[in-house]
Image (spheres, grey):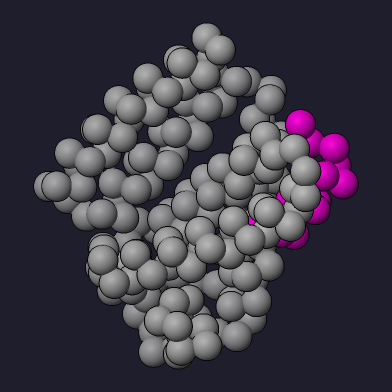
Amino acid sequence: MKKSKEFLVSSLIIFIVSLLIALFYDIKSSLIILFFSLLISGYFIYKEKIGQEMIIAFLFSFAITSYYVYEYSSFNIMIGKINLFPLVSWTFGLVFLREIYERLKEKKFLFITLFYLIGLFLVEYLGYYLFNIKLNTNYPSLFNLGIIHAPVGMKFFYVLAGPVYILITDYLKVK
């Protein structure tokens, strides 16, 4: 309980700072700071509990961001050809997904898959239409839903990444 309260307080502070940065700077940069700070805060508070799932999530994220070059129509922060925004966002999202999964009691995989897909579509929609986070490409969206503007292989990755990550972390007995 003490760790949860400590994480909640630190998350609130991180969120407020990120929101202030977003008011004066690029939204993607603010989200990088928010997600990275939450991951680091979670690691220092929960230590080994979150470390393994974070490493696996990072490897997932690194694999896709090093394979597919993300270049957005707005400001990009790159390390070589890897864009930090999708790298940190994917890592955070997968760790967050795993944390929710661990708290479920029954029909965990079915629920987390539905949660992931709804969350993915919502985040993609809000990012594209509300925050104007768009790639420098002309790929059509997934099923003309206005989300996931990427090549076909990337669309498969986006839809399958969450459930596959959960299956892998279960197989590896990550707690």
Q: Position of residue 166 (x, y in %)?
A: 74, 51
Residue lying at the far front of the rendered structure: 106
Please give the name of the residue rendered at 52% of the width and 88% of the height, measured from the top-left corner. 143
Q: Is residue 28 left or right of residue 39?
A: left
Where residue 21 appears, as percent x and y from the top left, is 20, 42
80 displayed left or right of 107: left
The image quarter containing residue 156 is bottom right
Q: Overall secondary structure of the magenta stretch? A: helix
Evaluate whether residue 95 shows in this view: no
Q: Residue at x 34, y 48 (%)?
A: 31
Percent of width and height locating residue 83 = 44, 60
Q: Does residue 175 appear in this view? A: yes
Label tally: 0
Quadrant where the C terminus sits is top right
Q: Nearer the viewer, residue 168 or 74?
A: 168
The region drawn magenta spans 162-175
Residue closer to the observer: 69 or 18 = 18
On screen, residue 59 above or below 135? above
Would you say residue 172 sits in the magenta stretch?
yes
Would you say 55 lies left or right of 11 here? right
Q: How far across and down, in percent of the image, does residue 4 sit?
A: 52, 19
Q: Is residue 42 magenta?
A: no
